[in-house]
Structure formats: C-alpha cells, structure tokens
Image (spheres, helix red, strand yellow):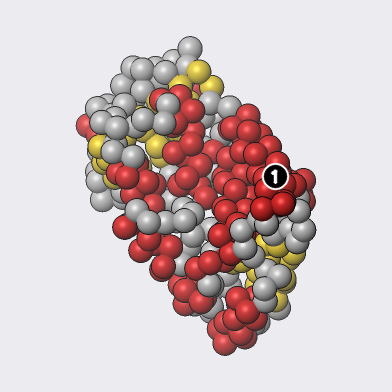
C-alpha cells in the first residue's frame, strides 16, 4: 500500500507559517488582485477559493473583472495601473483569457515585483538562472509533494516529468534540475512513456489525460505525483492523469486527486504573495519582534 501524500496537510503547514508572518508584519497587509476578463465558471470558482484562503491568512484579495470585450490595450492599461498602485503587492491574470487577447503580452506587462504566479518573462529567465524569488505555483507545489516523501534532498534522484507546458512541466523540470535531480521531460512526441517512467524514482504527470499513467508503467517503490485535474462529467467527479487504482499498489507514495497538488498550489500562491510583499517592503524591526 502506498503512502498517500496529503496535500491538504502540506498546505496547512505552509498557510500557518504565512499567517504567522503576516500577523508579525502588521498593517498594511499584502493585497493580491486577480484580474479576470469576462466570466469563466471554472476560473470564477478558483478565484472564490483563492479569495477565501487569502483572507484566512490575512492577505487581502480583490477581483477586478473586466468586460469580455476588453481589448489588449485596455487590459494592458489596467495592468499598468495595478503595477503603479503601491497598495497592490501581487497581481494574477486569470486564464483562460478570451481568445482575442494576447496572453503572453499581458503577462509580460505585470511588474516582476508583483508577479506572484511567476508567469512573466523575467520570472522565467530568473528560474533558468536559478535566481528566482518565486516560482510558478503548481510546479513548486509538485516539488513540495515530492519532498514530503523524499526529503528536501532530491539530488541524484531520477524524476520523470510528463508534460512540458510553460506553466507546469517546464518550470518543474528546472526546479528539479536546480535541486540536482536527474530529470527526463516527456511530452506528446515522446511516444511510449513506459521506458522512461519504469526507470524513474519519481514520476510527476501534468498532462490533462485521465488514466495516462498506469500501474505497469511505474517502478515498484516509485513516488507518483499527479498534477492533472480532469472533470469527468458522467461521474461528476475530478480525476487526475494517473490511474490511481492500478498505480497505488506499486508506488511507495502517491498524491490523490483531489487533495494532492491542488491545495498545495493555492498555499504556494499565498506564500509567493507574502514573499514579494516582504521583498517590496520589509517589516519594520518593531513588527518583526
Ligand atoms: P497543457 O498546457 O495542456 O500542457 C499539457 C502537456 O502535456 C503538454 O506539454 C503536452 O505535450 C503534454 N502531453 C499531451 N498529451 C501527452 C501524451 N499523450 N503523452 C505525454 N505528454 C502529453 O496543460 P497544463 O496547463 O500544463 O496542465 C496539465 C494538467 O495539470 C491539466 O490537467 C491541468 O488541469 C492540471 N493543472 C493542475 C493544477 C493544480 O493546481 N492541481 C494547476 C495547473 C494545471 P506537448 O507540449 O508536446 O503538446
């Protein structure tokens, strides 16, 4: 039987520390602004959850919803306004954006000092150079799930990452390299994944395909982290990319979906928000005591 990696417990520890540090800093509390263009049901529920969790640790959260027909220039003006507002310490741009908008251009406009999701080009460059202040939340969350089992020394571990998106797989590959893991990144063109996954100490999958990783693909004793989130309409439930029932008997440890990487991702977002607020305005010596 595999150990179930308890994402909620990891998230709870991170949030408790964030809450403590925010209380010690005193006012003004960090303010994170989520910018949403139009309305997307999944994004709206994610933002509501973000807002609830932020307020619980003492971070103020605001949703700026712009009309669905907002054009690139208006979105950029809005982001420039948030960059210039000293009360705003963090900015998030909710996705998906309406198709007519330039997501990459908008992300590039978010001041790197307020880029709490680390999605802009400066954050990406800093991650390559290993000089980053904060890392993309889900990639960092996957590392924390691995470390929960393997300890914080991933050096020499062979980790196979399936998926190479700009927001999850690729930054995760870099974070693992910086931790001295040996990293293999698989993607749509890899073909048969098994020769790679069967050799791995740990497998992290971030694709968006239910059942992609099966039990016969995992080495006995491997750690499996499932980033995927797939809503199965017919069963009205959320599943990951891992066929949990066949993988769990082989693995040493595995994240469930839900309750694995997801809660840790939100906690990392809060930690990133605090970190950038602290960098922008260090706590006064009195507040830190
Ligand atoms: P994405 O941008 O669609 O990227 C998917 C990646 O999977 C791509 O790199 C793609 O390869 C690769 N891929 C597709 N089919 C494959 C196959 N058959 N074999 C190997 N690789 C394959 O997705 P994403 O934004 O990274 O998200 C991935 C999953 O994580 C989704 O289910 C998403 O909902 C979930 N997610 C969860 C959280 C969380 O907090 N838990 C956060 C973010 C995302 P190519 O590059 O070659 O096309």
The correct choice, above or below, for 98 with respect to 73 in the image is: above
- The answer to whether residue 88 is seen in the rendering is yes
Q: Quadrant of residue 217?
A: top left
Label 1 CA crowd tier, 10 Å (few <14, some 14–19, many 20+): few
Q: Residue furthest left?
A: 195
Q: Residue at x 48, y 62 (%)?
A: 119
Most foreground residue, 82 or 211:
82
Return the x and y of residue 220 as percentages of the image width and height: 33, 17
274 relative to 252 in the view: left or right: right
Q: Residue at x 34, y 53 (%)?
A: 130
Query: In which quadrant of the rendered image does the C terminus lie?
Result: top right
Count of picture labels: 1
Q: Residue furthest bottom?
A: 73
Most foreground residue, 229 or 177:
177
The correct choice, above or below, for 258 with respect to 23 in the image is: above
The correct choice, above or below, for 100 with respect to 155 in the image is: below
Return the x and y of residue 93 as percentages of the image width and height: 59, 66
Q: Residue at x 60, y 48 (%)?
A: 271
- The answer to whether residue 94 is seen in the rendering is no
Most foreground residue, 263 or 59:
59
204 relative to 259 in the view: left or right: left
Return the x and y of residue 72 as percentages of the image width and height: 55, 83
Q: Quadrant of residue 204?
A: top left
Q: Residue at x 62, y 53 (%)?
A: 274
Q: Which residue is mark 1?
A: 289
Most foreground residue, 6 or 100:
6
Return the x and y of residue 103 as percentages of the image width and height: 50, 72
């Amino acid at each position: 039987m595999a150990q179930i990696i308890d994402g909620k417990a990891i998230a709870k520890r991170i949030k408790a520390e964030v809450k403590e540090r925010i209380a010690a800093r005193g006012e003004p509390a960090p303010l994170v602004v989520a910018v949403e263009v139009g309305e997307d049901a999944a994004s709206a529920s994610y933002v509501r959850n973000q807002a609830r969790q932020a307020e619980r640790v003492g971070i103020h959260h605001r949703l700026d919803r712009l009309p669905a027909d907002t054009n690139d220039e208006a979105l950029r003006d809005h982001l420039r306004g948030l960059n210039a507002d000293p009360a705003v310490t963090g900015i998030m741009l909710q996705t998906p954006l309406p198709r007519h908008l330039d997501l990459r251009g908008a992300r590039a406009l978010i001041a790197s000092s307020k880029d709490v999701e680390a999605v802009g080009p400066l954050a990406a460059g800093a991650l390559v150079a290993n000089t980053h202040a904060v890392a993309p939340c889900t990639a960092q969350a996957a590392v924390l799930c691995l470390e929960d089992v393997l300890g914080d020394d991933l050096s020499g571990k062979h980790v196979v990452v399936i998926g190479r998106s700009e927001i999850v797989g690729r930054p995760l590959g870099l974070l693992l390299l910086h931790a001295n893991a040996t990293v293999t990144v698989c993607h749509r063109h890899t073909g048969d994944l098994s020769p790679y996954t069967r050799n791995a100490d740990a497998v992290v999958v971030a694709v968006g395909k239910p059942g992609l990783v099966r039990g016969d693909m995992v080495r006995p004793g491997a750690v499996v982290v499932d980033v995927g989130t797939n809503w199965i309409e017919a069963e009205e439930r959320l599943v990951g990319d891992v066929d949990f029932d066949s993988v769990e008997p082989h693995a040493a440890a595995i994240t469930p979906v839900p309750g694995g990487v997801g809660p840790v991702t939100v906690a990392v977002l809060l930690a990133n928000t605090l970190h950038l607020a602290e960098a922008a305005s260090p706590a006064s010596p009195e507040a830190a005591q």
